[in-house]
Amino acid sequence: MSDIKLLDSLISLALSDKIPERNYEQVVNNYLEPNFVNESQIEFHDSWEPSLHDDLYKYGIADSITTLETYQKQTRIASEIMKRYSTEFVNNAQIKFGFLTEGIQVKAVIALEEVTRNGLTVNISQLEKLASELQEKQEKAQAGLPSEYGAYFQLNIGKNKKKKELKKRYVILEELLVKAIKELENLTGRRICYPTKPDGRASLMHQQWKHLADSHPFIKAWVETEYAKFMSQFVTNVKTTRTTSGTVHP
């Protein structure tokens, strides 16, 4: 079945040239009456053997019904949109390619062609400003850290260093992240769930720790530092790849 969120975006794009930011529930409510399906109204057959998962089953049934009803209503709306431009479409376009294909994908192809022909330009000064702001945030976040945490940022191990040194840094980082989590748990009196690898060890991907950045000074400093490093490298790459006219692609 088609993704009702995707179809909702395509319909909105065709009607208003805007893509709404709606979650599943908001999409459903946009097409159906509130409480279109009430889980309390769902009853099982007399032969059904009660289980601990009955509520879950009821939720799944209600979800399936509302999804199907929403999709069917979206289908009718999309069909009406297609009819407005029926003379411009190839025969059986709706059946062959799906709703709104020519209205959306053809426009995308045209836009891509323009990008290929004219190239993309980047505002270098704006990029440098953003990189500078991130650098300031990084320095501010590192300032005042306890020595055991601050020492981590003094380790100067770049990508070209030996794997043994890199591994040592990763071990130190993992230890400090776990230590920060334990401090948070002692402070709040509750267990803190944090990003982990499949083997259960702490994840070292800073993007996964963003939601905990404001919870502990070290986590915040580490996340800010990694983002600043990424942006700095991005600015450098853009500067070295752009043409004399200022474009970076093609």
Image (cartoon, rainbow, N blue to C red):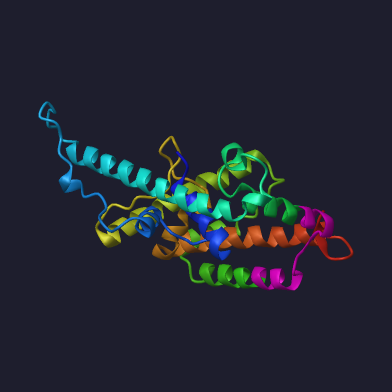
Give the left or right position of residue 43, taking residue 204 as reference. left
Q: Which quarter of the rendering shows the N terminus?
A: top left
Above or below — where is 212 with respect to 134? above
Q: Residue furthest front?
A: 87
User: In the image shown, does 73 or 221 lie closer to the viewer?
Assistant: 73
Above or below — where is 181 with respect to 49? below
Q: Is residue 120 magenta?
A: yes
Q: Residue at x 24, y 58 (%)?
A: 189
Instruction: Evaluate whether residue 157 shows in this view.
Output: no
- Number of numbered markers: 0
Q: Residue furthest right?
A: 244
| Percent coordinates x, y for residue 106 in the rendering | 69, 50
Instruction: Evaluate whether residue 9 shows in this view.
Output: yes
Q: Residue at x 34, y 53 (%)?
A: 182
Magenta segment's dominant SS is: helix
| Percent coordinates x, y for residue 78 in the rendering | 51, 51
Q: Quadrant of residue 248?
A: bottom right
User: In the image shown, does 165 or 67 lie closer to the viewer?
Assistant: 67
| Magenta-drawn segment | 113-131
User: In the image shown, does 201 or 63 lie closer to the viewer?
Assistant: 63
Give the left or right position of residue 57, taking residue 98 as reference. left
Above or below — where is 66 with respect to 152? above
| Percent coordinates x, y for residue 29 in the rendering | 34, 58
Q: Residue at x 58, y 50 (%)?
A: 100
User: In the image shown, does 193 or 146 lie closer to the viewer?
Assistant: 193
| Percent coordinates x, y for residue 27 in the rendering | 40, 56
Q: Quadrant of residue 26?
A: bottom left
Q: Residue furthest left?
A: 46
Q: Is residue 82 magenta?
A: no
